[in-house]
Image (cartoon, grey):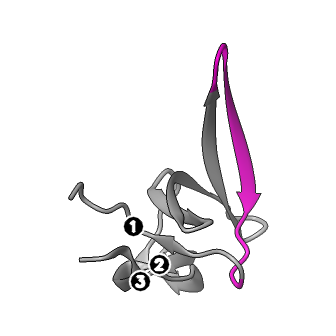
Amino acid sequence: MNGLAHMGQIEDGTDSGGFRQFLDGKPIRAGDMLELEVAGHWLPARYEMNYHARQGSIHIQLFAPHSKKEIVFKIDHDAMRFRWPQPDA
């Protein structure tokens, strides 16, 4: 199975708890791990949600010698592609 079959965009919707975002029709919960496509590569990213602003964000950790940084992106529905983590091939 290639990653193209499973990538998509995050969509807004609702479930029994109210506002929620979905990927491939599955609800995304705060703390879920997703993969974000960047320049043809898939990076692991943690999903978080600001329910008051109805704005999801993606957190990517960068590791460098003697430091651990985290970059946070607001989700851009039109520009970002995501997928659920893939099992190791």
Residue drawn at (68%, 81%) of the image? 77
| Helix, strand or loop for disc 3 | loop
Q: Amino acid at mark 1?
A: Trp
Query: Splitting the image into 4 quarters, where does residue 81 fall?
Result: bottom right
**Circle 3 sits on which residue?**
24
Q: Is there a contact, CB below 8 Å, between mark 2 and mark 3?
A: yes
Residue drawn at (47%, 78%) of the image? 23
Q: Position of residue 6 (x, y in %)?
A: 37, 80
Q: Position of residue 63 (x, y in %)?
A: 61, 29
Q: Amino acid at mark 3?
A: Asp
| Helix, strand or loop for disc 2 | strand
Q: Quadrant of the N terminus?
A: bottom left
Question: Whole-Å distance between the Cαs marked 3 and 1?
Answer: 9 Å
Residue range of the region highlighted in magenta in the rendering: 64-78
**Circle 1 sits on which residue?**
84
Q: Is residue 8 left or right of residue 53?
A: left
Vertical position of residue 62 compared to residue 23: above or below: above
